[in-house]
Image: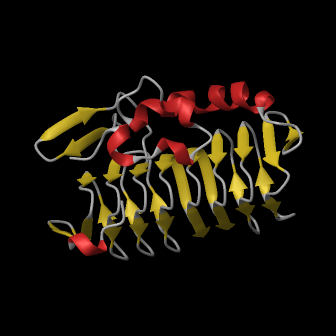
């Protein structure tokens, strides 16, 4: 099952690559996002980035709509777009060319370059890989209903996270269909697709199509983008 950092992400596509150093699984990075931003922000080149508030660094080439709400710690990388009424609650890295759309909410996340969360999405305690896309209204659920610690269910293996809050880990080039819910501790491997209106939990292998619970099929080799 594709759970490890090197299996999910190409770290050349994020300004936050250093956050992953020395770690095996991506959810191990969640506790360190805020401190990482506070350390990296002051080192960003002043000719390309500007400080817009306490612990907020925004690329001069990024497009920020006036109605967006930005709270630190936060880095918005070059040519990203933060659209109308987006709400970034802090501890967020928004990658190059990423889109945070209408009424989308982010909290304690890393969005790799070219990620799109463009319409009514909630993304919390999650990491979204290069060119991953969440369809309109799809969300990450980051807390279990019984409030117990999140465990990653990877086939026959159960991997404890030690965390109460874990959203979703989406590998590079993942497509999430509209209206889907990614339950706490969901991991979707590189190049996989999730059908609209899905309720997903556990690990979806790389290069797969998630149709519904119990029906996950392998993509044809000529359609997999890894």
| Residue at the limit of the structure toward the left, as seen here | 156
Q: Is residue 81 visible?
A: yes
Drawn side of residue 65 relative to residue 186, left or right: right
**Whether residue 195 is situated above or below residue 79 in the rendered picture:** below
Spot occupied by residue 71 in the image (x, y as percentages of width and height): 76, 44
Drawn side of residue 112 relative to residue 53, left or right: left
**Whether residue 154 is situated above or below residue 220 in the rendered picture:** above
Q: Is residue 164 visible?
A: no
- Which residue is more in the foreground, 3 or 195? 3
**Whether residue 106 is situated above or below residue 137 in the rendered picture:** above
Drawn side of residue 6 relative to residue 107, left or right: left
Q: Residue at x 68, y 42 (%)?
A: 90
Drawn side of residue 59 relative to residue 10, left or right: right
Figure quadrant of residue 216: bottom left
Spot occupied by residue 56 in the image (x, y as percentages of width and height): 79, 39
Q: Residue at x 56, y 44 (%)?
A: 109
Spot occupied by residue 96 in the image (x, y as percentages of width and height): 66, 54
- Which residue is more in the foreground, 220 or 129? 220
Spot occupied by residue 31 in the image (x, y as percentages of width and height): 52, 28
| Image colouring | secondary structure
Q: Residue at x 21, y 74 (%)?
A: 220
**Whether residue 188 is situated above or below residue 164 in the rendered picture:** below
- Which residue is more in the foreground, 224 or 107? 224
- Which residue is more in the foreground, 170 or 161? 170
Q: Residue at x 47, y 67 (%)?
A: 138
């Amino acid at each position: 099952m594709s759970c490890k950092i090197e299996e999910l992400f190409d770290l050349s596509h994020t300004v936050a690559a250093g956050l992953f150093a020395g770690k095996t699984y991506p959810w191990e990075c969640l506790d360190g996002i805020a401190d990482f931003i506070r350390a990296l922000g002051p080192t960003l080149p002043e000719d390309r980035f500007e400080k817009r508030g306490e612990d907020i660094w925004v690329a001069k080439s990024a497009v920020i709509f006036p109605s967006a709400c930005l709270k630190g710690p936060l880095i918005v990388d070059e040519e990203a777009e933060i659209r109308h009424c987006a709400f970034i609650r802090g501890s967020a890295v928004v990658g190059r060319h990423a889109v945070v759309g209408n009424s989308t909410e982010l909290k304690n996340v890393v969005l790799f370059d070219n990620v799109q969360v463009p319409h009514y999405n909630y993304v919390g305690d999650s990491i979204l890989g290069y060119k991953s896309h969440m369809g309109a209204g799809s969300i990450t659920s980051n807390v279990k209903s019984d409030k117990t610690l999140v465990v990653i269910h990877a086939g026959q293996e159960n991997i404890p996270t030690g965390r109460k809050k874990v959203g979703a880990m989406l590998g590079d080039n993942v497509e999430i269909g509209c209206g889907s819910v990614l339950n706490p501790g969901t991991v979707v491997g590189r190049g996989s697709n999730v059908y609209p209106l899905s309720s997903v939990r556990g690990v979806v292998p790389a290069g797969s199509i998630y149709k519904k619970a119990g029906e996950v099929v392998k993509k044809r080799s000529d359609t997999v983008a890894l």
